[in-house]
Amino acid sequence: MVTGDNIHTALAIAEACGIKTNDGIAMEGTELRNLRENELAVVIPKLQILARSSPDDKELVVKHLKRLGEIVAVTEDGTNDGPALKAADVGFSMGLSGTEV
């Protein structure tokens, strides 16, 4: 789950939806941005919640998952997330502003 919400809200939603497990990682976008490439390779496969993320963070996660051989789907509702949508194998753009993508 990659969201702009704060970490507490994101954790509550993820736990209620069964997204967060005991062995998964939850972090904020600022933490992700500070990781080196070798650290990303360890963190991203275990990353379940990325809160306070930027559009660049979303694109980074998508591209890294694809490099690891994962098939990635992205849903978004804004044009600023176009790069993540385009980088994904499957992209769903929702809402009025997202239809431009």
Image (spheres, rainbow, N blue to C red):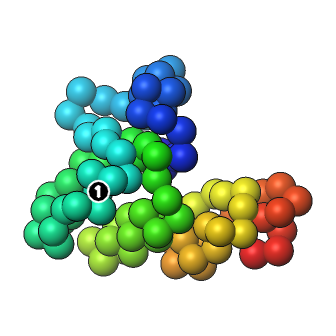
Q: Name the residue located 49 percent from the left edge and 59 percent from the top edge.
A: 54
Could you tell me residue 87's position as x and y percent?
A: 52, 78
Q: Name the residue located 19 percent from the left edge and 62 percent from the top edge.
A: 35
In the rendered view, does 77 fall on the left or right side of 59? right
Of residues 22 and 98, which is closer to you in this image?
98
Could you tell me residue 77's position as x and y percent?
A: 73, 57
- Secondary structure beneath dot 1 equals helix
Could you tell me residue 28's position as x and y percent?
A: 36, 45
Of residues 11 and 91, which is closer to you in this image?
11
In the rendered view, does 61 fall on the left or right side of 14? left
Q: Is residue 87 above or below residue 55?
A: below
> The disc labelled 1 sits on which kind of residue?
Leu
In the rendered view, does 75 fall on the left or right side of 71? right
Q: Which residue is mark 1?
A: 32
In the rendered view, does 73 fall on the left or right side of 62? right
Q: Name the residue located 64 percent from the left edge and 57 percent from the top edge.
A: 75
Q: Tell me if I can see residue 69 in this picture.
A: no
Label 1 packing within 10 angstroms: few (<14), some (14-19), many (20+): many
**Number of marks in the rendered image:** 1
Of residues 46 and 3, which is closer to you in this image?
3
Q: Tell me if I can see residue 5 in this picture.
A: yes
Q: Residue furthest left?
A: 38
Q: Name the residue located 83 percent from the left edge and 55 percent from the top edge.
A: 95
Could you tell me residue 88's position as x and y percent?
A: 53, 73
